[in-house]
Structure formats: structure tokens, C-alpha cells
């Protein structure tokens, strides 16, 4: 089973070794053998670049620590011992001028006069010789970690040259002891550094979220972190399924690693291996980064592998790919639908405009572009387009005040191509987003001027046909009435002849034939009279709305002739029983006649009021009145009495002369009256009075 990089146990750093522990036993033995009375150990202090007192034997440590000899003083004999590594006898250190006076005073306090200075070195290097044969400085004492110093030995009787020779074994033993201590300290420091590095390595390897492992040249796992252990290590206590999954992972990874090692690439990314989740049993996809490694200490080659779990990323990538395909399909469908919608909009004859919340135009179809973005760049067309945009924006701002989602209204625009005035009905619908906020308004325009013109022409044709039909009916009724009287006489004569000849007369059959035929002629005449008296069904009618509708049908035509319509409608006007289409024909006929009487333009005033006006005594208060006044040329008095006669017209060569005659018949069929006032040069007024309850013979529901 592969090893796991275990976290090392925490260790406290060992205490620092004191050189006194090593040197003091040696000094005691030397002083006892050579009868030295006092000794002071000076050690090299790298921070102060000086020999500093460490401890003393026979000398108080406090006094020993006062000694500080800068190594920068090359004349100092004690410093020279350190540099040359050779013992030296100093007859009287307290009086030697080569030593700083402050140091001499301390030496005197320590009673170190005649002394032997012996070097203390932990290095095994021999002293080097200069070119003149003298000893050179032994290298290594300046480096941290090397023990270097000088021991000062003294006795009251003084020192001799033989003492220097006697100290040679001591120097060698001190050197060996200090070297041993140095090695121990180095080993201790190395072990501690290794433990610290292993501690940090444990945190570094197990702090990452990916599995990290080291394999040898046979692809066997040597080391692995805890993430890798979850995939490749199982114990006997684990379930059979987990052990099987771990075995499968080791097999799959080893096989993949064998294949990758054949590529001989220094470091490779983008490799993938599929493993099994030992806990859940799910398939896991790992991206593997492999790096060849060599352990030069033992001469082994291996591979460091980092396994990054990319299962979710791959699944997300696959889902994104599927989503991208769906999105592309949806985009294609949207494009097709957009093209289809664009084709529909381009072929819709009505202008369609989409604006945002700031009334800025977002899109429009070609029909709208002809009104707001004309192809012609002439100043006239540009001015008309700008005027249309201003009117539409103002109109739309007014429509926004209406809380309804769909709004309607009318607006007058100008055709930039020919300056024609257009009466447009706008249907505006708000578009909301998912949160219910308005994001756009779609406006569909309909040229109602043309529709009204078609309606006006239709009504004129209906009025013309009605006039002809009414004239034909009245003519037929007159003929029938005139024929009916002599026909009654013929019937009476035949009746008398039948009585006179009796049933047995040979001429009686001829008389019966004549009687039957005269009766048939009588029935035909009655049918003709009934046809003339036909009426449309009566219903409750809003007279004010009828006036506005009739005016809307002819307003464009009248405006082209310089004629304006002014309505003065009574808002409290009651609804009446009437045939709306017939009354609309009457109003339309009066408006067109009034316009014909004003070739140079003018104003037509249409007023409604409750009550019968001057005819109150006839209708009472349950009546309404309509007045149509113009500012035209007026009708002469000699013609005024004939205007309601059939086939009479004040416009020779124009019209049938039946309009007012039919209109008066319609009003009379409603139980009302139609009167006229006119003054030449001041205009004409037609007054129509209608009962609220309708004609007397109207059959009404209870």
C-alpha cells in the first residue's frame, strides 16, 4: 500500500547549547594540571565584530563579560591569537600598549596580568602560511555556526614559554570538543529545519483541494495526500464496494499513466482520466497534470500527478453545449419568425410604429416610414415628416394618461409625398415585460379619411337610390290613386251588369272574367300603395352621436372646399325613437346642400336642443330640434316655397331635385316637421323637429 504524507507531530525547539558546558570541564582539568589560578573565555561576537567575555573561572562572570576586544585592532596580541590560531604569552597584559586602555583596566580588575592566550576553534582546518612563512588566518571562524574565541589563563607566579607547549593538547581537545558540539548543533538544527519543512509541506500538499500523488517508474503510488487517499486507498474495514472502486481507480490511473509516460513530455495538461467515486459509485472525470521528477538522493525517477475534479465542469459544459444547440435552434426559429413577421409587416398597408417609454421610435414598417421617414429629401417632405413626428409624439403622450392597456384616438397627419391631409385613427397597445413594466407601445394607424369618404359615397348613393325609389313610389302611388277611382266605377258597373243578366245569361261568363280581372288590378294597386308606405324599424337613437357621425363622413370633403363644421350639441338631449339610417341621410343631404351654397367657403353650424322651439304648442316639451345653419348665398323668396317639391332644384344640371322632398318625407314619417328660413346673402337655416316618442303609429315594446 502506498504511503500517505502524514502530518508530523509538533515538536518544541531544543534549548540552545552553552559553550561553558563543553569548555569548563576541560579548563578545570588544565588549570588543575598546570596550576593556573584564573581563566576567562572570550568568544567571537559576529554582531559586534569583537571578542566578548563569556564566562570566567576564578574571575567573576560579570567582570569577564565586561571584556570586549574589537577584532578591527590588528595590533592587539589577543586578537592576533584569534586570527593566527597560535597560542601566545603576554608578560603583562595590564601594561601592554597594544591593548586598548579600557580593556587593560578590566584585565587589571580581573587580576589578569601575566597571561597565556590560547585560541579556541571548532574548525578542523590547519593554519595557512603566508609567503614569508608566517601563519595566516585560518578560515572559517568568521562564519556563523563556527565556535571561535580565545581563553586567557593566568597565575600569580607568572607564565612561561613551557606553559604554551603544555597548552597544545588542551587546544586540540578543545577543538575536538567544540567541533563535536558544532556537529551536534548542526544535526539538531538540520533535524529541526527538516521537521519544520515537513510541517509546511504537509500543510501545502493537504491544503490544496486537488488530489496530489507521487508514483515511481513502475507507476506504483509512493506518496499521496488525503484527497488522493480517498480515491486510491482502502482499508480492510471498508466495504467490498469501496475496495472494489479503489482497486478500479488504481488500475485505471496506472493504465493511463503508463500511456502518458510513453509520450516523454516534461509537463502536460489537458489529459483526462475517468475514475469511480468510492463512496457514491458515480463516474468522476479528472484532469491530470503530470510532471516527471527525480530523487537525486536515492537516484529514483518518478512522476508527480495533480488530479483536478472536472466532473461538474464537464457536465456543465455538456449542458451548455446542449443549451447552445437549443439556443441556436431557438434563434433559427426566431429568425424565421422574425422574417415572417417582417414580411407581414412590410405588406400591411397600415402604418405600424413601435416606440419606447421615452416616445423614441424603435421600429416601423414601410407604410409608417413613408409618413415619418420619406425617401424624398426635399425640404417640403422633411418638414412634413418632422411635423408628423411632433404630432404623433404629442398625441401619444396624451394617450399615456389613459390607464387602459389599449387606447384609441384620432390624429391629423400630412402625406410628405403630396401634402394630402390624412385623418388617421391610432390604436396603441402597451407591451409589458415579465414584471409588468411597460417597455414599449405598438401603434397601428388606420386612414379613416378614406373609409369615411367611402361611407359618404355609399350614403350618397343610398340617398340617391332612396330619392329615386321614393320618387318612383310616390309616382306609382299617385298613378295608383288616380287609376283606383275609375277602377272602382268599372267594378260597380260590372256588379250591376251581373245582377241584370243573371246566372243563366250567355254573356255572364264574360262579365265574371271582367270582374275577376278588375279585382286583380285593385289588389296590384293596393300592393303598390303598401310598398310606398314601407318604413324602417324604429329604435332608441342618440341624436348628438348621429350628428357627429354624419359630420365625420363629410368633414374631409368639406374642408377641401374651405367649409368648416361647428357643432353646438345639447349634452342633456334625450334619446328619441327613430330610424337612425334615415335621419343620417337627412343630415347628410342638408350638410352637402349647405356646402354647395358656399362656393367660397364658410361655416355650417349644427345645433341640437331639447324642446320644440317655436312649435311647442304642437309637440309640447317631449320633442327635440335640430338646426342646420350655413353662411351661404341664401334662397330667394320666390323659390323658397318650391324647394320641397319633387324634381325641383336650385342647381341646374346638378342633382335630381328629390333630396329635400325625400328628406321631408322621412321627417314626416317620424311624426316630425321640417321648416326652412333663408335670406339672400345671409344664409339658410333648416329646422327639424322630432317627437321623442317617435311617430304616433310606432309599435313599441311595453
Image: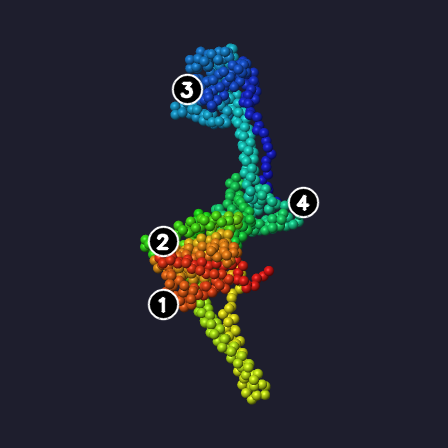
Q: Position of residue 433 (x, y in %)?
A: 51, 50
Residue on which disc 4 sits: 237
Above or below, 247 against 62 in this view is below
Viewer-closest of 572 and 256:
572
User: Eyeballing the image, is 92 above or below 594?
Assistant: above
Q: Which residue is mark 2?
A: 384
For mark 2, give the secondary structure.
helix
Per the model, the C-alpha gap separating discs 4 and 1 is 121 Å
Circles 2 and 3: CB distance less than 8 Å? no
Eye-nearest disc, 3 or 1: 1
Give the farthest residue toward the bottom.
Answer: 506
Question: Residue 76: x, y in percent?
Answer: 43, 17
- Please name the residue shown 49% across and 70% down the image: 532
In space, the residues marked 2 and 3 are separated at their CA atoms by 109 Å
Q: Which residue does the numbered mark 3 point to in the structure image?
A: 74
From mark 4 to mark 3, how far is it between C-alphas?
A: 75 Å
Q: Residue at x 55, y 25 (%)?
A: 16
Q: Pointers 3 and 1 in contact (CB under 8 A)?
A: no
Question: Which image quarter is the N terminus in?
Answer: top right
- The answer to whether residue 330 is visible is no
Q: Nearer the viewer, mark 1 or mark 2?
A: 1
The mark found on residue 141 in the picture is none
**Secondary structure at numbered mark 3:** loop
From this viewpoint, is residue 637 visible?
A: yes
Q: Secondary structure at mark 1?
A: loop
Above or below — where is 474 with respect to 270?
below
Residue placed most toward the observer, 289 or 498: 498
Instruction: Look at 63% across and 50% down and name the residue there.
Output: 244
Circle 4 Cα neighbour tier, 10 Å, few/some/many (<14 / 14–19 / ≥20): few
Q: Single out the mark in the foreground, 2 or 4.
A: 2
Amino acid at each position: 500500500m502506498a504511503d500517505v504524507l502524514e502530518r508530523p507531530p509538533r515538536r518544541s525547539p531544543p534549548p540552545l547549547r552553552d559553550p561553558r558546558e563543553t569548555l569548563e570541564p576541560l579548563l578545570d582539568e588544565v588549570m588543575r594540571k598546570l596550576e593556573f589560578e584564573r581563566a576567562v573565555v572570550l568568544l567571537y561576537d559576529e554582531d559586534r565584530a569583537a571578542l566578548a567575555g563569556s564566562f570566567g573561572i576564578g574571575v567573576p562572570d560579570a567582570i569577564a563579560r565586561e571584556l570586549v576586544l574589537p577584532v578591527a585592532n590588528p595590533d592587539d596580541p589577543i586578537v592576533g591569537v584569534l586570527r593566527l590560531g597560535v597560542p601566545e604569552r603576554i608578560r603583562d597584559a595590564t601594561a601592554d600598549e597594544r591593548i586598548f586602555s579600557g580593556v587593560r583596566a578590566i584585565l587589571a580588575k580581573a587580576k589578569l596580568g601575566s597571561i597565556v592566550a590560547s585560541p579556541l576553534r571548532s574548525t578542523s582546518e590547519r593554519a595557512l602560511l603566508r609567503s614569508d612563512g608566517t601563519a595566516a588566518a585560518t578560515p572559517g571562524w568568521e562564519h556563523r555556526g563556527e565556535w571561535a574565541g580565545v581563553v586567557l589563563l593566568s597565575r600569580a607566579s607568572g607564565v612561561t614559554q613551557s606553559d604554551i607547549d603544555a597548552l597544545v593538547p588542551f587546544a586540540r581537545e578543545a577543538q575536538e570538543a567544540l567541533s563535536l558540539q558544532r556537529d551536534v548543533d548542526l544535526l539538531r538544527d538540520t533535524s529541526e529545519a527538516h521537521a519544520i519543512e515537513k510541517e509546511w509541506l504537509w500543510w501545502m500538499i493537504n491544503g490544496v483541494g486537488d488530489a496530489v500523488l507521487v508514483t515511481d517508474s513502475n507507476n506504483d503510488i509512493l506518496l499521496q495526500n488525503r484527497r488522493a487517499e480517498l480515491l486510491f486507498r482502502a482499508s480492510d474495514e471498508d466495504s467490498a464496494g469501496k475496495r472494489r472502486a479503489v482497486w478500479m481507480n488504481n488500475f485505471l490511473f496506472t493504465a493511463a499513466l503508463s500511456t502518458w509516460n510513453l509520450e516523454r513530455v516534461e509537463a502536460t495538461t489537458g489529459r483526462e482520466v475517468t475514475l469511480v467515486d468510492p463512496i457514491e459509485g458515480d463516474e468522476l472525470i479528472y484532469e491530470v497534470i503530470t510532471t516527471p521528477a527525480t530523487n537525486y538522493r536515492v537516484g529514483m525517477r518518478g512522476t508527480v500527478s495533480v488530479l483536478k475534479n472536472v466532473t461538474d465542469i464537464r457536465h456543465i459544459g455538456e449542458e451548455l453545449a446542449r443549451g447552445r444547440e437549443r439556443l441556436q435552434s431557438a434563434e433559427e426559429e426566431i429568425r424565421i419568425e422574425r422574417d415572417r413577421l417582417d414580411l407581414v409587416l412590410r405588406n400591411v398597408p397600415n402604418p405600424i410604429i413601435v416606440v419606447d417609454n421615452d416616445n423614441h421610435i424603435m421600429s416601423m414598417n414601410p407604410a409608417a416610414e413613408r409618413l415619418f421617414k420619406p425617401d424624398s429629401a426635399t425640404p417640403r417632405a422633411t418638414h412634413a415628416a418632422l411635423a408628423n413626428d411632433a404630432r404623433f409624439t404629442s398625441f401619444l403622450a396624451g394617450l399615456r394618461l389613459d390607464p387602459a392597456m389599449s387606447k384609441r384616438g384620432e390624429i391629423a397627419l400630412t402625406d410628405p409625398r403630396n401634402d394630402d391631409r390624412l385623418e388617421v385613427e391610432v390604436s396603441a397597445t402597451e407591451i409589458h415585460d415579465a414584471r409588468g413594466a411597460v417597455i414599449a407601445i405598438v401603434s397601428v394607424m388606420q386612414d379613416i379619411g378614406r373609409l369615411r369618404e367611402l361611407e359618404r359615397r355609399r350614403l350618397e348613393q343610398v340617398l340617391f337610390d332612396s330619392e329615386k325609389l321614393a320618387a318612383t313610389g310616390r309616382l306609382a302611388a299617385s298613378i295608383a290613386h288616380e287609376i283606383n277611382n275609375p277602377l272602382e266605377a268599372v267594378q260597380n258597373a260590372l256588379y250591376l251588369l251581373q245582377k241584370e243578366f243573371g246566372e243563366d245569361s250567355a254573356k255572364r261568363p264574360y262579365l265574371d272574367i271582367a270582374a275577376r280581372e278588375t279585382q286583380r288590378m285593385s289588389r296590384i294597386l293596393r300592393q303598390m300603395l303598401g310598398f310606398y308606405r314601407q318604413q324602417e324599424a324604429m329604435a332608441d337613437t342618440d341624436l348628438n352621436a348621429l350628428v357627429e357621425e354624419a359630420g365625420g363622413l363629410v368633414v374631409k370633403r368639406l374642408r377641401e372646399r374651405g367649409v368648416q363644421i361647428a357643432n353646438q350639441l345639447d349634452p342633456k338631449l334625450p334619446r328619441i325613437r327613430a330610424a337612425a339610417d334615415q335621419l343620417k341621410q337627412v343630415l347628410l343631404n342638408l350638410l352637402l346642400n349647405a356646402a354647395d351654397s358656399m362656393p367660397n367657403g364658410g361655416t355650417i353650424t349644427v345645433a341640437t336642443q331639447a324642446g320644440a322651439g317655436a312649435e311647442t304648442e304642437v309637440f309640447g316639451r317631449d320633442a327635440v330640434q335640430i338646426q342646420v345653419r350655413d353662411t351661404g348665398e341664401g334662397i330667394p323668396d320666390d323659390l323658397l316655397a318650391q324647394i320641397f317639391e319633387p324634381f325641383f332644384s336650385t342647381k341646374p344640371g346638378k342633382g335630381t331635385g328629390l333630396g329635400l322632398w325625400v328628406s321631408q318625407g322621412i321627417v314626416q314619417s317620424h311624426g316630425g316637421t321640417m321648416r326652412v328660413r333663408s335670406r339672400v346673402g345671409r344664409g339658410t337655416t333648416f329646422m327639424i323637429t322630432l317627437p321623442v316618442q317617435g311617430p304616433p303609429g310606432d309599435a313599441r315594446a311595453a
